[in-house]
Image (cartoon, rainbow, N blue to C red):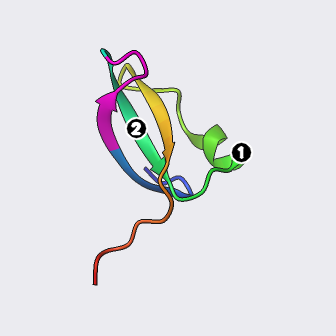
Amino acid sequence: MRVPNVVGTYVGLCADGKALCIHVMLSRDTRETRSALPKTIAGYGVVVDVSGEIRPLK
């Protein structure tokens, strides 16, 4: 996904604990980033998680 501040994605459960959703991890939460994200992808809901910057271990 080529949206600024997106650092990763994963499939997980929605808030209801039953349905699957696509979680999008953000390094920073901005209005521009949220507006660039789709509400659904391939019929799955999109959930935003602000994880911060992700760096490899040294």
Q: Point out the stretch of residues depicted in magenta.
A: 10-17
Q: Is 1 part of what is drawn in magenta?
A: no
Q: Secondary structure at mark 2?
A: strand
Image coordinates for residue 10, horizontal then vertical, percent = 31, 42
The three-letter amino acid code for the residue at tag 1 is Arg
Image coordinates for residue 9, horizontal then vertical, percent = 36, 46
Residue under circle 2?
Answer: 23
Number of labels in the image equals 2
Residue in the image at 68% along x and 50% along y: 30
**Is residue 8 positioned above or below 17 on the image?**
below
Q: Does the residue at mark 1 contact the one at mark 2 (Cβ under 8 Å)? A: no
Residue in the image at 63% along x and 50% along y: 29
Mark 1 surroundings within 10 Å by alpha-carbon count, few (fewer than 14), some (14 through 19), many (20 or more): few
**Is residue 28 positioned above or below 24 on the image?**
below
Residue under circle 1?
Answer: 31
The three-letter amino acid code for the residue at tag 2 is His
Residue in the image at 55% along x and 39% along y: 37
Image coordinates for residue 28, horizontal then vertical, percent = 60, 57
Image coordinates for residue 51, horizontal then vertical, percent = 47, 54
Q: Given the current orientation, which residue lies at the most extreme bottom position?
A: 58
The image quarter containing residue 14 is: top left
Say left or right for 4 vs 47: right
Q: Point out the tag, 1 or 2, that comes first from the N-terminus.
A: 2
Q: Is 14 part of what is drawn in magenta?
A: yes
Residue in the image at 45% along x and 49% along y: 25
Q: Secondary structure at mark 1?
A: helix
**Is residue 57 positioned above or below 36 on the image?**
below
Mark 2 surroundings within 10 Å by alpha-carbon count, few (fewer than 14), some (14 through 19), many (20 or more): many
Q: Classify the position of the C terminus by image quarter.
A: bottom left
